[in-house]
Amino acid sequence: MKKLLALAVALSLIFIAGVALAEKADGEKLVRDLWKMFADKQWDQVEAMMSPAFQSVHTYGADDKAAEMKLLRGLNLGAYELSRFKVTQERNVVLVSYFAGAAETIKGKRLGGKATPRLTIFIKTDKGWMWLAHANLKYVPAK
């Protein structure tokens, strides 16, 4: 009986470990997919991926979901390069820091393509991975 109980516990732990591994996010892929949506101007998909609680911070200050979508809809993204990814995950939250170099036109101004640090945060919900927050350390003109 003890051996059967020990086997059941061991199998349960293996199953739980397998589920935990299966739920681990590929943070780099989430960011790359998001940037592809930016480049392809798939704004409805971007907005659907954003959490209602979304916040971003730029050099001019903070934005909520509506303000970020307004900024993004005005984005004209040229060639871009993403590099130097660091991904950490704590339960249902994934943090991805990386460098993004892009020739961007934001608010009618063409910004240089020098790579600058970014931080993007995703949260796992019943709808899948949602974009929760973003920090952009590249200069963006004030509103």
Image: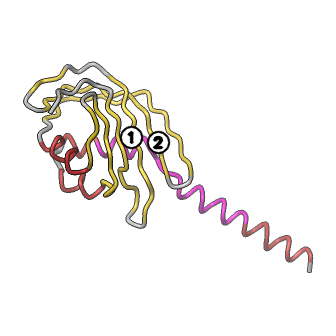
Give the percent coordinates (x, y) of residue 81. 30, 28
Give the quarter of the image for residue 22. Answer: bottom right
Label 2 sits on a secondary structure element that is strand
Kindly identify which residue carries mark 1. 120
Write down the region rendered in magenta: 13-34
Give the quarter of the image for residue 80. Answer: top left
Q: Are marks 2 and 1 in contact (CB under 8 Å)?
A: yes
Cα distance between the residues tagged 2 and 1: 6 Å
Is residue 124 rendered to the left or right of residue 34? right
Taking depth in this image into account, of 15 and 49 the one nearest to the observer is: 49
Taking depth in this image into account, of 44 and 5 the one nearest to the observer is: 44
Q: Residue 6: which disc?
A: none
Q: Label 2 amino acid?
A: Leu
Q: Label 1 amino acid?
A: Thr
Q: Residue at x 43, y 62 (%)?
A: 125
Q: Residue at x 17, y 34 (%)?
A: 77
